[in-house]
Image (cartoon, grey):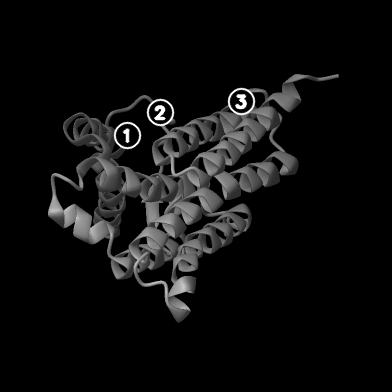
Amino acid sequence: MNIKKHIPNLITLINLFCGCVAIVFLSRNSFEMAFIFVCLGIFFDFFDGFFARLFKVSGPLGLQLDSLADMVTCGVVPGFVMYRMMQESSIFMYEGHMQLFPYLGFIITLGSCYRLAKFNIDTRQTDSFIGLPTPANALFILSLPLVLQNYSQESLIILEILTNKWILLFITLCSAYLLNAEIPLFSLKVKKLSFKENALQIVFLIVSILLVVLLQYIAIPLIIVFYVLLSVINNLFLKK
């Protein structure tokens, strides 16, 4: 029995397990623990592919299993987070159709599902991404309640933005759009030890680390926005 060929799939299943645990914590309104387990899931999601390439055991089973695990960790979980945030924002307006409003948060889950299915058959996304990767989107969405919990008392602007149901709906729709938009985004994978060829990734990582040190939770959505903007700017220079 070749144990090596099962290691990447086992790591993928650990990613799925982390997503399931995150859902349990969300049901208890423990957003921070849910965020931690999603981060763990994304960590394992990175290494399942690494070990598959290392052991040369990549195959269609691993590809499908990876997408199914990501669907929970980076699809269902962020949709559930937005559902809970919309639920809180509409708590005083539960009359008639407003009872259904929070369910619109699961548009993120639908967008993630479509993105993951499309990724599996898109041959263009071997060295870069077309549309926002589901892990990046999940981190963006899961950071929002943490920003609200930790900074709303210090900033009325944050409180007003992240408790406004229409702004949350706008974020939801933008999330689903960016997941599937035909926008090339650079990958963080380093293939050659060359500063020139990896300058974009190095700049992004340095800025990201500085933002996390200075701003903590607020840095997370800013980093994702910076990632998209940096990719768009890079695309414009490549066209020239």
What is the CA distance from the residue labelled 2 to the residue labelled 3?
Answer: 19 Å
Reading the image, the residue beneath label 3 is 51
Picture layout, residue 51 above or below residue 28: above
Above or below: residue 28 compared with residue 123: above
Q: Residue at x 44, y 71 (%)?
A: 101
Image quarter of the N terminus? top right
Q: Which mark is residue 208?
A: none
Q: Check the picture and name the quadrant holding the C terminus.
A: bottom left
Label 1: which residue? Answer: 198
- Mark 2 or mark 3, earlier in chain: 3
Q: Residues within 10 Å of mark 1 (few under 14, many from 20)?
A: some
Name the front one of labels 2 and 3: 3
- Do the residues bearing badges 1 and 2 touch, measured as CB atoms within 8 Å? yes
Query: Where is mark 2, residue-wise?
Result: 192
Residue 86 point in image, percent of width and height = 39, 62
Q: Is residue 64 visible?
A: yes
Q: Residue at x 20, y 43 (%)?
A: 151
Residue at left 26%, top 54%?
229
**SS under mark 1:** loop
Q: Depth check: give the residue in front, 45 or 236.
A: 45
User: Could you tell whether 125 is left or right of 66 in the image?
Assistant: left
- In the structure shown, which secondary structural element does the residue marked by tag 2 occupy? loop
Three-letter code for the amino acid on which mark 3 is drawn: Phe
Tag 1: residue type?
Asn
